[in-house]
Image (spheres, rainbow, N blue to C red):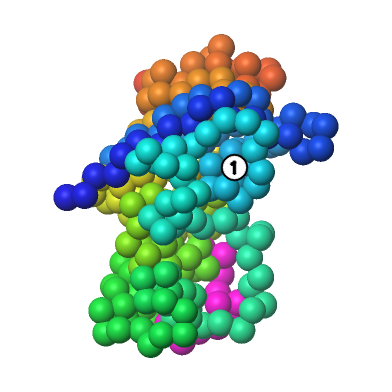
Amino acid sequence: MNRAEAITVSNLAVYYRTVEALKSINLTVQPSRVTGMIGPNGAGKSTLMKAMLGLINVSSGSVLYEGKPLYENLHQVAYVPQRSQIDWSYPATVWDVVMMGRVRKTGWFRRFSAVSRHTAAAALERVQMLSYKNRPIGQLSGGQQQRVFLARSLAQEAEIFFFDEPFVGVDQKTENIIFEIFKELAKAGKIVLVVNHDLGESIANFDDLILLNKELIAVGNRETVLQEEKLNQAYGGKVIFFSEMNPPLAA
């Protein structure tokens, strides 16, 4: 079993012109754990994920993986952005989208091997979407689209998996499938980092949590992070969240 090293974020800061989006973030994302990033709207969750990947400029700090900046290891990263950032009118089939996950291993303008086609088919089968392989991606429901992009990430055979709000607009079946696969990836020693906006019952599916509101409020296992004082600090007042000890709990 391959086991990824941890990702270490040190003193990371991001400014949008004169506005401070993230302030001195220090944390470690461990392999073999499903890690959720939570916080209110505008807290900088997506910003932190993009900054870690080198998709936006940082003002200071570093993000290291295997002794190098994470953006130099993107061949080991599978990243699924928010659905709102994807052009669903693009004329691609489900199969086309999943095979995009094999381009890095195959090379541009080269024929896909039988191994790549088998890997893509297995990924679609795992998310229960193989029968839709010839369907235009734009004709699928939100949950089906999310499952296809999850299949594309699986086809990449990456060590690190980043998902930005994968549960927005999806059905319960899709949410269950996604969490099952997240747990399988963690069990295989992968890094799984997920931006999540829901503090409901689904929060129990995460091993670790990162609580953010432009600065790091708390990081650790669920019991460490889901404390009333820390949640109120992040969300600026009373918030209803799920507690395994006493669900639901009004904080």
Q: Is residue 40 above or below residue 97?
A: above
Residue kind at label 1, given as amino acid type: Ala
Asked if residue 135 is among those painted magenta in the image, a careful observer would answer yes
Q: Quadrant of residue 38?
A: top right
> In the image as oriented, which residue stretches furthest toward the left?
1
Residue displayed at 63% across by 16% down: 233
Residue displayed at 47% across by 79% down: 108
The stretch of residues the image draws in magenta is 133-143
Residue 36 x, y percent position in the rendering: 46, 37
Asked if residue 112 is among those painted magenta in the image, a careful observer would answer no
- Disc 1 crowd rating (10 Å Cα; few below 14, some 14-19, many 20+) is many
Residue assigned mark 1: 51
Residue displayed at 47% across by 85% down: 109
> In the image as oriented, which residue stretches furthest toward the top?
229
Q: Quadrant of residue 212?
A: top right
Q: Is residue 191 left or right of residue 72?
A: left
Q: Is residue 152 among the parts visible in the rendering?
A: yes
Q: Is residue 167 among the parts visible in the rendering?
A: no
Q: Secondary structure at mark 1?
A: helix
Residue 214 x, y percent position in the rendering: 66, 28
Task: State the quadrant of the C terminus.
Answer: top right
Tag count:
1
Q: Is residue 59 left or right of residue 245?
A: right
> In the image as oriented, which residue stretches furthest toward the right?
18
Q: Is residue 206 left or right of residue 39?
A: left
Residue displayed at 37% across by 38% down: 67
Q: Is residue 161 above or below residue 155?
A: above
